[in-house]
Amino acid sequence: MVLGVGGVGSHCIEALARSGVGTLDLIDNDTVCVSNLNRQIIATYETIGMDKTDAAKERIRQISPGTAVNIYKTFFLPETADQFDFSCYDYVVDAIDTVTGKLEIILRAQAAGVPVISCMGAGNKLDATAFRVADIYETSGCPLARVMRRELKKRGVKKCKVVYSTENALTPIDNTGAETKGSCSRPAPGSVAFVPAVAGLIAAGEVIRDLTGHNRRMKWRRIWQNSWSRARISREVLLKNSESSFGVPLSTQ
């Protein structure tokens, strides 16, 4: 389930389709605008005016005909959330930009026991190498993440995996004629081709690694390595202390 078919979401969707995900549910009610051409992979001159979900479905059909694509032409908000049964999904990707919607996605996914990854702000950024994957409470430098931390804490959410940027948000030089959001009706942050794309690809990578168990294996490997490292350090400290106290080292056998 991918919510939001924009600069971040469209790249995430395509990466998931190319990675062999069998079924994708896409949720968005926006249409492709001319100003989407600079960063949304579904945006071409041929798709301008199309619903984004339709454009994404057609693109996936050309790439992976065997992938089942279900589209929902609605903006995900607390008022529309009851349309979706989160327990039916293996993974949820939050690629929308409204705080109320993002909070509702996380709360519903966690209540259903479904893994979720939430993408923080990708607008007003220029450094695509500054993205990180972390728990929401370990983020810094992202204004949207700061709001999400506060609101999730109020709601008792203990953790949530997110993609965020450590780069400080920039101020667009000139907003005259800038893109608007929500069927081209409200101002949007400045954006470029390479930043939201990277965020979407990182999110897709996390989904694939989680679904295949790779992240879990790596987590346990790190735990084992850290435990072994601590055990070695404790042993070395013990031997050193014994030698200084008794003048002879303890047996290592």
Image: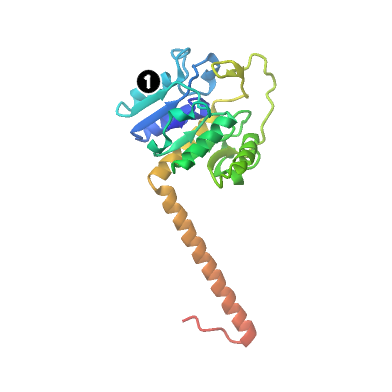
Q: Residue at (56%, 35%) from the top-left corner?
A: 103
Q: Residue at (56%, 15%) from the top-left corner?
A: 184
Mark 1 — residue? 58
- Asked whether 35 or 68 is in front, the reply is 68
Left or right of residue 7, residue 171 in this image: right
Above or below, 2 against 50 in this view is below
User: Residue 58, located in which quarter of the rendered image?
Assistant: top left
Give x and y (percent) for residue 37: 52, 18
Where disc 1 sits, the SS reads helix
Q: Residue at (54%, 66%) from the top-left corner?
A: 230
Give x and y (percent) for residue 170: 68, 30
Q: Amino acid at mark 1?
A: Glu
Give x and y (percent) for residue 19: 37, 35
Q: In the rendered image, is residue 189 in sight?
A: yes
Instruction: Give the quadrant of the N terminus.
Output: top left
Left or right of residue 210, residue 139 in this image: right
Q: In the rendered image, is residue 195 in sight?
A: no
Above or below, 228 against 64 in this view is below
- Asked whether 13 or 112 is in front, the reply is 112
Above or below, 68 against 136 in this view is above
Left or right of residue 31, residue 190 in this image: right
